[in-house]
Image: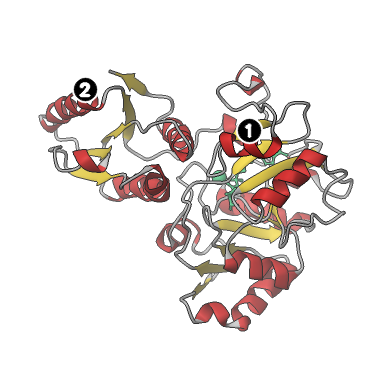
């Protein structure tokens, strides 16, 4: 398949023809990659089974892993959900459009291709001008997982998407204003006590302030103990770089000393070594590749997946990542890092 690439810069964002063409592809059952504020999405018409099947083929994704349905505005179409609890409405009013996905009871017409056979559906109203215009113009509900090959880091830049999906989709819309850098927060609102199934830029604290009630999150939620994970995507290995990644946590000084010592050990072999670290430490490591998280957790989130992909591109065999403080969006950064490392954590 020949993939059409479209690059959006300031002026082209106003060019209607791009959206008309992309919307037509979606309506005809094709696949379009589009930017959102979190990561790029790989979209298809959510009510076209054949189109949704193509998503799984293009990504090489197991088909029991359900998809998020994206909508143009904060009003959820009736054909999508059976009911919207009052607390879910509060979340929609407060955080949409934005990086929050809400799990609700699905309406009858939503196929199991979308839900992976569950009785629920994940709904998200993204906060990105390009995504919103495309959704609005198409008039569709668009199923869209992250636009990466399954098991690779989610794409946050045009070159990531092109590398993974060129030749596998009809159109790729590149607009490198994908600012958040990690996937949306996913919250299950179909249960008695809401559960955050995946942490993201909308934090537990913000949700608690909005709902004025207790909510569960991955550290406290029951999903860790149950054999059928609540967010089925959580059971798959994710975001993995090709090199062996370890996370080192603890006192900043001890972490730095430990990693540098490991780096020196690796250097005795012929292996290539990378370190991901806070900005203050970036000049103090002697690794082949040293990548800084930037000035805070938000910058770490924005750059994380590009760092992991950079390690691959540079052929790094061994990667050490300093832990970041698990507060605010830092919690989501650590959640993704830990998955990328296959839970390989060293506490010093
Ligand atoms: O930021 C995002 O959410 C991005 C952009 C493109 O919108 N999308 C994204 O989709 O990250 P994906 O497919 O990579 O991740 C969706 C997650 C998976 O962990 C999946 O298991 C979970 O949401 N999920 C989807 N539907 C669900 C449902 N009905 N119940 C529980 N978890 C669900
Ligand atoms: Mg994904």
Q: Residues within 10 Å of mark 1 (few under 14, many from 20)?
A: many
Instruction: Write down the residue under mark 2.
Output: 254
Give the structural element (helix, strand or loop) at label 2: helix
Residue 164 lies left or right of residue 233; in this view the side is left
- Residue located 71% across and 31% down the image: 194
Instruction: Write down the residue under mark 1.
Output: 196
Q: How is the image coloured?
A: secondary structure
- Measured as percent of width and height from the top left, residue 104 is found at 78, 41
Cα gap from disc 2 to disc 1, whole angstroms:
32 Å
- Measured as percent of width and height from the top left, residue 229 is found at 65, 26
Residue 116 lies left or right of residue 280; in this view the side is right
- Residue located 67% across and 40% down the image: 210
Residue 56 vs 267, above or below: the answer is: below
- Residue located 54% across and 77% down the image: 13
Q: Which mark is residue 275?
A: none
Q: Quadrant of the C terminus?
A: top left
- Residue located 12% across and 38% down the image: 286
Q: Are marks 2 and 1 in contact (CB under 8 Å)?
A: no
**From where the camera sits, is residue 123 visible?**
no
**From where the camera sits, is residue 13 visible?**
yes
């Amino acid at each position: 398949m020949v993939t059409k690439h479209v690059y959006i810069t300031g002026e082209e964002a106003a060019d209607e023809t791009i959206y008309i063409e992309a919307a037509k592809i979606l309506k005809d059952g094709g696949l379009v990659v589009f930017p959102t504020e979190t990561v790029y999405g790989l979209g298809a018409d959510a009510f076209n089974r054949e189109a949704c099947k193509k998503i799984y083929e293009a990504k090489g994704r197991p088909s029991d892993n359900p998809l998020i349905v994206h909508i143009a505005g904060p009003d959820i179409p009736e054909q999508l959900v059976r009911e919207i609890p009052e607390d879910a409405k509060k979340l929609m009013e407060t955080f949409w459009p934005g990086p929050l996905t809400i799990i609700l009871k699905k309406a009858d017409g939503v196929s199991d291709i979308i839900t992976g056979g569950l009785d629920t559906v994940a709904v998200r109203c993204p906060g990105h001008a390009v995504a919103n215009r495309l959704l609005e113009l198409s008039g569709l509900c668009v199923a869209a997982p992250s636009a990466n090959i399954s098991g690779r880091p989610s794409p946050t830049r045009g070159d990531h998407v092109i590398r993974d999906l060129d030749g596998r989709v009809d159109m790729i819309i590149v607009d490198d204003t994908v600012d958040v850098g990690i996937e949306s927060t996913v919250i299950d609102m179909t249960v008695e006590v809401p559960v955050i199934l995946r942490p993201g830029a909308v934090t537990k604290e913000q949700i608690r302030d909005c709902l004025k009630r207790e909510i569960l999150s991955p550290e406290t939620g029951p999903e860790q103990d149950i054999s059928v994970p609540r967010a089925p995507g959580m059971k798959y290995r994710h975001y993995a770089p090709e090199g062996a990644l370890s996370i080192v946590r603890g006192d900043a000084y001890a972490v730095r000393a430990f990693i540098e010592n490991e780096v020196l050990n690796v250097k005795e072999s012929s292996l290539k070594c990378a370190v991901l670290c806070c900005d203050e430490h970036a000049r103090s490591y002697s690794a082949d590749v040293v990548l800084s998280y930037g000035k805070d957790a938000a910058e770490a989130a924005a750059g994380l997946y590009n760092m992991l992909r950079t390690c691959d591109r540079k052929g790094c065999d061994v990667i050490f990542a300093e832990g970041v403080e698990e507060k605010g969006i830092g919690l989501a950064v650590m959640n993704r890092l830990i998955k990328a490392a296959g839970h390989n954590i060293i506490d010093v």
